[in-house]
Amino acid sequence: MTKKVILASGNQGKLREFYRILGSAGFEIAPQSDYDVVDVPETGLTFVENAIIKARNAAQQSGLPALADDSGIEVDALNGRPGIYSARYSGKGDDANNQKLLEEMKDVPDDKRTARFRCCIVYMRHAEDPSPLIADASWEGKIMHELSGANGFGYDPLFFVPGHGTSSAELSPDEKNAISHRGKALQMILSLMKQAKI
């Protein structure tokens, strides 16, 4: 029997990655737009706080179990910025975010361009769930000097993947899901859901 879960996101790239991994495990993932869920301000100071806020909001408004992720890129030379503010770094979308990051990193040498994508996924059985399932994963890499590749979304064209010699945006969806922060966090949350017999 498929179990319907609402996904607290309107990001098409994230939706595709969730469908790809959880859909094949027997879950029916419904975007929150199907239930007219109104976004809630992300007032947390960490990825896990924001994921909990979003999952609780979606469960409350839809009456369904909810999944939410909060993710972003942490750049060591920028003291972990943009971090939880990754999606709204420039206030003007993906292209402007990438340009802002390139500008901030223009004088940073290669050996100091280390960064990681981080993803925290929360599953709440209902809005009052006192013990949500939480998965947290990261993906190490470096910030490139220019954009490369047309796959993925967000900072993928600037994220160099050691071991592959390419940007994240040059990987196929299957390659990316096998090694990415979100791919790893999704496998972890899936494992936790199975252990909890969800």
Image (tube, helix red, strand yellow):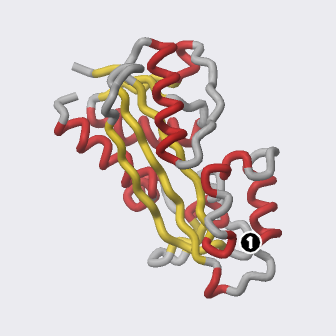
Q: Is residue 32 left or right of residue 122?
A: right
Which quadrant is home to the N terminus?
top left
Circle 1: residue type: Glu
Q: Quadrant of the C terminus?
A: top left
Query: Where does the image place residue 25, in percent across and percent down from the top left?
Result: 27, 35
Which residue is located at x 51 percent, y 36 percent? 15
Residue at label 1? 146
Label 1: how many residues lie within 10 Å, few (<14), some (14-19) or many (20+)? Answer: few
Q: Is label 1 in a helix, a strand or a loop?
A: loop
Q: Is residue 48 left or right of residue 13?
A: left
Identify which residue is drawn at 41% across, 26% down.
66
Left or right: 46 as drawn, with respect to 21: right
Q: As displayed, is residue 176 above or below residue 46?
A: below
Q: Position of residue 125 (x, y in %)?
A: 33, 24
Front one among 17 and 98: 98
Residue drawn where x is 47% and y is 35% of the image: 52
Camera-side residue: 102 or 21?
102
Residue 17 spot, x, y in % from top left? 46, 43
